[in-house]
Image (spheres, helix red, strand yellow):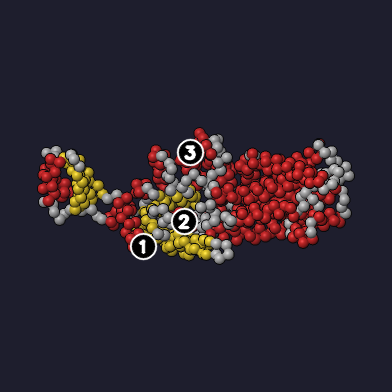
Amino acid sequence: MHNFLRFARQQISVQLQIRTFNLYSLLLFFIQPAIFSAVGMVLSRAAGNAAPDLVYTVIGGGILGMWSGMVFTSTYDIRSDRRDGILELLIASPTSLRRIEAVRTFTNITASLVSLLVAVGAAVAIFHFSFNGINIFRLLLAVVILLYSLWCLGVFLANFLAWSRLSGSLVDFLELPMAFLCGFMYPITVLPQWLQGISTFVPVRWALQALNATLLKNQEISQYWFHIGMALLTATIFWLTSLWFDRKVHDHIRLTGELSSI
Amino acid sequence: MNAIEAKSLQKVFITRRGFWRQKRKSTIAVEDVSFQVEQGELFGVLGPNGAGKTTTVKMLTTILLPTQGSGSILGHDLVKDTREIRKHIGFTFGGARGLYGRLTAMDNLRYFAELYALDPLYSKKRIPEMLEMVGLLDRSDDRVETFSSGMQQRLHLARALLHNPDVLFLDEPTVGIDPVGARELRQTVKSLQQAGKTILLTTHYMAEAEELCDRIAIVNHGKIVAMDTPSALRRRISPESVVEITVSQENAVVIEEMIKKLDGKLRMESISSLTEQHYSLFTPEPETVLEALSPALQTRSIQGLQVRNQTMEDVYIAIIEETSLNA
């Protein structure tokens, strides 16, 4: 455990230096969510709402920033490691790629939390969003479960990206539809039933339902725990799948030689 | 126990083309490679581009799984004991890839020290030692992206040695390094061998292989086509030495008369220029040739004289050409 913590500290430090503190992250965590929020507010007005729903526009934009942080950094890490010849060195070290990815994704997700914090700050400071009547414990728990859901998904995607040079294209193709299936910027209930059915398997959808309903103060407590439970269950399934997948990835990439970009 | 053992290693890469009607194409990178390297030995692998050198190294460093065959490092099986092998080996690949450019040299090594689970007290002492060994201690706090490719190559060696591995794989370690840096690196490699490390080195530079290696394997088309000590490989091609003579055109007739008397004891090649005549005399008895030429040496009719063995490059080219013709 002590060794793992030391490794985790070093990995977090490296991750922050090489990925988090750069211009790209600034765009990802601040500029992109601001654009999404602005578009959300415009669409909300166009739909006839007198005042935009801050939970689904401003705060939703922040959550979309977290999503992008998870998707882009977890997949970008593997891509750039493959391109720079580092993936081979990681695979051939005594530390498993699973462990490296777990800490990396944790760092990426935690760093992207800044996106949500800025969005909430903007909602409060600019649009006078109020926390009155919101259960803070439930709110914090929902945020933690959201982070866990994103982490499980991030670990799974990173593993998937390691599988093949081509898997990145597939993730690029699926990433945005998946994001919209989670209901970042609108209630999931506005989607047709069949789309809601598909989104059942995405843990972030459940975590967001718990979070948004807490912020909107319009949820039964039993519903809240149901959403939290579903988020935990589906996220854990992703995590367990990635654990099972990890061994296969390790052998597959060593068999196909897809560890390097050439 | 051998430090490195490869038994009929084979690696086939399968690529697929097309979406609906996929076509599979098999590429044999390594067809059949077998060798043993004793502990403390410096073993060289030579071969043209695409011969399978790097793929062989990648299989032995557990980066790639062999398609067929088996192997072991310090008695640990290549396929079953990967985790154990990884603790005992270090490796570098040619070129400047494989480091985090945005991190300093020190931070890169700190990170890899953690990947190898080194004790913090040990790595605190070891990292500066390694940086000093490769001449980068004064640049330890500079970002790697500001380093030349030669400096990055040296940093790779420091990284590979961090955990003090017993077996070291160096894949073209002097590629991209200037002559002075390459000489220093060769010196480092020699001192590592003297310290008891087993080293497998691949290189394109014949002189480097000849200078460093106890034994050399020449690889072509995924197979070992020759393997022996550098001197035995030279003898294998031809036991002849080469006597090189340069004379002025006016003395050429006299020298040729002398050479004619040795008919049957040598094979001659000559190159003529306006003022000089150059002879290469291939002979198993260089002493006899020198004795026959001694009158010309005494009268200073010979401008230049050199007796040399066939070089590793002569050997390498002869073997590669022979095996390419047979392939």
Q: In this orientation, does residue B178 appear?
A: yes
Q: Which residue is under mark 2?
A: B55
Q: Which residue is under mark 1?
A: B327
Q: Quadrant of the N terminus of chain B?
A: bottom left
Query: How many neighbours does mark 1 have within 10 angstroms: few (below 14), some (14-19), or many (20 or more)?
Result: few
Q: Secondary structure at mark 3?
A: loop
Q: Secondary structure at mark 1?
A: loop
Subunit under mark 3: B
Q: Quadrant of the C terminus of chain B?
A: bottom left
Kind of residue sitting beneath label 1: Ala
Disc 3 to disc 1, C-alpha distance: 40 Å
Q: Residue at x 13, y 54 (%)?
A: B263
Q: Name the front one of labels 3 and 1.
A: 1
* Residue B29 x %, y %: 45, 59
Q: From the viewer's perspective, is B75 left or right of A50?
A: left
Mark 3 touches mark 2? (CB < 8 Å): no
Q: Which residue is under mark 3?
A: B148
Q: Residue at x 55, y 49 (%)?
A: A83
Subunit under mark 1: B
* Residue A100 x %, y %: 62, 50
Front residue (pair B278, B105): B278
Front residue (pair A231, B133): A231
Q: Are discs 1 and 2 both within one chain?
A: yes
Q: Are discs 3 and 1 both within one chain?
A: yes
